[in-house]
Image (cartoon, coloured by chain):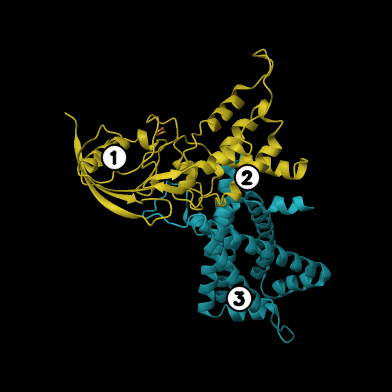
Amino acid sequence: MTKTINLTLKIWRQSGPGSKGRLETYIANTISTDMSFLEMLDVVNEQLTLDGKEPIAFDYDCREGICGQCGCVVNGRPHGPENGTTLCQLHMRHFSDGDTIFVEPFRARAFKIVKDLVIDRSPLDKIIQAGGYISASTGGCQDANAILIPQDTAEKAMDAAACIGCGACVAACPNASAMLFVSAKVSHLVLLPQGRPEAAQRVVSMLKTMDELCFGNCSNERECEAECPKEISIINIARMNREYIKAGIASTVQ
Amino acid sequence: MQWIFDFFGSSVGKKLMMALTGLCFIGFLTGHLIGNLTLYGGRDAFNAYAEHLHALGPVITLVEWGLLTLAAIHVFTGMLLFLQNLKARPVRYAINKSGGGRTISSALMPYTGFAILLFLIYHLLQFHFVDKTFTTIYDIVSLAFANVLNISFYIIAMVVVALHIRHGFWSLFQTLGANHPKYMPMVMGGSLVFSLIFGIGFGFLPVYISFSG
Ligand code: FES
């Protein structure tokens, strides 16, 4: 027998980017504890549709914790109370019968609310477009051992590359800063030989774009690494700071 | 030249200014505390220390102006960061909950910073910008700390300073990019040790003076 729980939900409803939103109360009864958080919202939405009401808009794609499309602030915590978990992978067994759950969108000046819990994450894409890539022309495939990369370095780069760009770091940061995201993108490239040639220009451009998009300034509160579903460390932020100092005072990048 | 403004004007650049000026203040506080230890030597020791300091003449003036400049940078940049960060999230969350990263000390940084600024003005008016023609600095200090209210005020101020350093110390290393798995635990420990040394070191002086004087 699956266990079921009854919940009271306080969910942020907002009809569009410019309009005023508010928290509305919904009752979700007989929710199976085997459901994911998003499946629970699906159940609520089915009922809303049957009642002829507007279903709650929320974002998702893969529902397996790899795409970075889902994410809301659940009871004050991005992606909910479990560490290292995306919202789609959060299961209702982590809640108890009779709980009241607050669900809000990721909030930042840089993230416009599209509708209800759906936000526009494109500012993160703009940061990537500013330099989060390498522009080496591809040629013939070279020998796999031509460029040696120590295992340890490859691991560090992979840890940074685990970032799915969900924006939870921005949502968690008391200053709505995107430093963990940007530093993860800077780090996974700069750690590898292929990323080094453009390192200086990359870090300067990406940070400049981050500032222009009105994200906040990092004050080392460490909420980002605590909430990151991929548990990316702020050691990446220190690495980016280093790269920025190097680029600023020792490179010719303006 | 423009690159210098661009470099320090970015979000990381502003943090670098906070870190570098903060580091200077930790250096200054260390010197200040060591100097103040002469208070334990009594009236003559402390007055002699003050005299030696003033005998340095232009060097002292230079240091004072230097510290004032650093303070102006630290305060101005800090306020700018604070305001920008407020603006970065115009609609606040209904429920705020920490994931475990924040500490009291980190959350209060702008407020402890502002409190320290107010304290500093009071402190300078009380001990620096006073007429010392007919008295000595030791007498001014011991007279000030005969007052219980003043003693409590100073102790509270030192708790605030300790809180500010608790986050500021490790944070400046992180900002300067000095986060290394081998050394970060030491920096974190150092953060606690420094805040305790400054908090207790300065905070105990008024108590000692009031009892000895
Ligand atoms: S829906 Fe893809 S990570 Fe949650």
Which image quarter has ligand 1?
A: top left
Q: Which residue is mark 2?
A: A207
Give the residue type that dot 3 points to.
Answer: Tyr
Left/right of residue B77 with respect to residue A18 in the rendered view: right
Looking at the picture, tell me which residue is in the foreground, A9 or A191.
A9
In the image, farthest residue toward the bottom: B134
**Residue neighbourhood size for the residue with mark 3, other residues' Cα within 10 Å, grouped as few (<14), some (14–19), many (≥20):** few
Closest to the camera, between mark 1 and mark 3, is: 1
Give the residue type that dot 1 points to.
Answer: Leu
Q: Residue under mark 2: which chain is it in?
A: A
Q: Residue under mark 1: which chain is it in?
A: A
For the point 82% across and 71% down, the residue is: B57
Figure check: A21 above or below A151: below
Give the residue type that dot 2 points to.
Answer: Leu
| Spatial separation of the CA atoms under disc 3 and disc 2 | 39 Å
Display colour for chain B: cyan
Figure check: A31 above or below B105: above
Helix, strand or loop at mark 1: helix
Figure check: A188 above or below B82: above
For the point 63% across and 52% down, the residue is: B15
Q: How many marks?
A: 3
Chain coloured yellow: which letter?
Answer: A
For the point 68% across and 65% down, the residue is: B72
Q: Is residue B87 visible?
A: yes
Q: Which residue is mark 3?
A: B122
Q: Which residue is mark 1?
A: A41
